[in-house]
Amino acid sequence: MPDYEWQKKMVGRHAAQYVSNGMVIGLGTGSTVRYFAEALGNLVQDGVELRAVATSPQSRRLAEDNAITLLELDGAPRIDICVDGADEVATDLSMIKGGGGALLWEKIVACASARRIYIADSSKLVGRLGRRPLPVEVCQFGHSVVARKLGEHCDDVRLRVQGDHPFVTSSGNYLYDCAFGTIFNARELDALLNNIPGVVETGLFIQMVDVLVSFDGDTISCCESADEVWWN
Ligand code: A5P
């Protein structure tokens, strides 16, 4: 059984190689990005000037803990690269994200970035998406009506909870985790879901990978297009 925690650390550190002095970085969310943020902290200690735009309150804390200057997205001059994790990466490099509940801000920041690096241990690599439920962010108003609509397209729809209450995203929305089973056409599904009034965003990230950093066996491996993937 691979040591996935070690892989997270290695891909997180590796991603720091894409960073250079003066960059504005979109800082993703999650346990893999934590290692990237630590590597950035080391660069800052060595005198490299970096600024970051956070994708969640957790990501903001990661930046603060590593002495990285934070910018608000609306005030940022540009974002040179964003580095983020993934929950699933398929062989066409489409992804499911949102396991940590930050998909909306992650997608906005990724779309605002000149270059997008995703870091993932090899447990995240799948043939097709859908091994895990797809997170869908839904506005609070009428959320149960929206959930019924979602349920017309999937096997199971679950409101994400935190303790005794619904989980609330950074934008004040709810999340529904939707079990679709194998997703054969992610683009079509994304369009279908986004067409339901009340759906704010889905956790499907399509054609957003500029570089994927992961593991092939015991070795770090990177790819920039679906032609270069090594798993199936
Ligand atoms: C946050 O909402 C997610 O999209 C994370 O980026 C994703 O869940 C990866 O997280 P880990 O690095 O903790 O697996």
Image: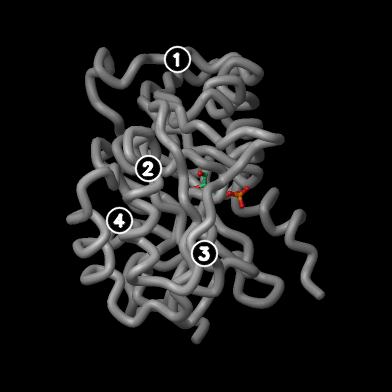
Please tell me which residue is depicted at 30% across the width and 56% down the height of the picture.
208
Specify which label sits upstream in the sequence, 2 or 4.
Answer: 2
Give above or below for 105 relative to 22.
below
Report the residue marked by disc 3: 133
Report the residue marked by disc 4: 208
Measure the C-alpha gap from mark 4 to mark 1. 24 Å
Q: Amino acid at mark 1?
A: Leu
Report the residue marked by disc 2: 143
Specify which label sits upstream in the sequence, 4 or 1.
Answer: 1
Measure the C-alpha gap from mark 1 to mark 3. 32 Å
Give above or below for 91 relative to 119.
below
Q: Amino acid at mark 4?
A: Met
Measure the C-alpha gap from mark 3 to mark 2. 18 Å
Image quadrant of residue 90?
bottom left
Name the quarter where the N terminus is drawn.
bottom right
**SS under mark 3:** loop
Q: Which mark is residue 70?
A: 1
Judge left or right: residue 207 versus residue 121. left
Labels 2 & 1 near each other (Cβ < 8 A): no
Residue 57: image location, x then y, percent: 53, 23
Specify which label sits upstream in the sequence, 2 or 1.
Answer: 1
**SS under mark 1:** strand
Residue count near mark 2 (Cα–Cα under 10 Å), binned few <14, some 14–19, many ≥20: some
